[in-house]
Amino acid sequence: MTTLDLPTGVQINAPILPGFETILTRPALELVAILHRDFDPRRQQLLALLVGHERVVRLRRPVDPGIPARHLHLSSDRLHGASIRSYRCGSS
C-alpha cells in the first residue's frame, strides 16, 4: 500500500494505488488545498443557484397526468367546459 505526504486538512477518500505518489505530490496537493479553500465558497454558491434553477425548470415542465388506460375511453369533449359547466349547474 502506498502512502502519501498529505498537507494539513487534505484527505483522500479513495484507494491509493502504486504510482499515484508520482502525480499526487505534496506540492500538487498543496495547490489543490489552496484552490479549494479559495474557491469552494463560490463553487457552493454556484451549485446552490444551479439547483434552484433546475428546480424552477422542473416545475415549469409540463407534467404527464398519467391517465390510467381504463379511463382513456372517455372522450375529451366530455372533459371540457360545456359539460363541466352543466354539471356544476346540476343538469347533464
Image: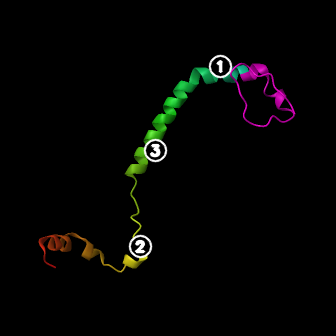
Magenta includes 20? yes
List the residue tagged with mark 2.
Answer: 68
Report the amino acid beneath label 1.
Ile
The stretch of residues the image draws in magenta is 1-29
Residue 39 pos. (x, y %):
57, 24
Residue that appears at 39% across and 50% down: 59
Spatial CA span between label 3 and label 1:
30 Å
Instruction: Report the predominant secondary structure element of the magenta stretch.
Output: loop
Q: How far separated are the C-alphas under marks 3 and 2?
A: 29 Å
Image quadrant where one finds the N terminus: top right
The image quarter containing residue 75 is: bottom left
The percent position of residue 10, horizontal first and vertical second, equals 70, 24
Image position, residue 63 (x, y; %)? 40, 59
Judged from the image, the secondary structure of the residue bearing numbered disc 1 is: helix
Circle 2 crowding by C-alpha within 10 Å: few under 14, some 14–19, many from 20:
few
Report crowding for label 1: few under 14, some 14 to 19, many 20 or more residues within 10 A (C-alpha): few
Left or right of 11 on screen, residue 78 = left
Sooner in the amino-acid sequence: mark 3 or mark 2: 3
Residue 17 magenta: yes
Q: Where is mark 1, residue-wise? A: 34
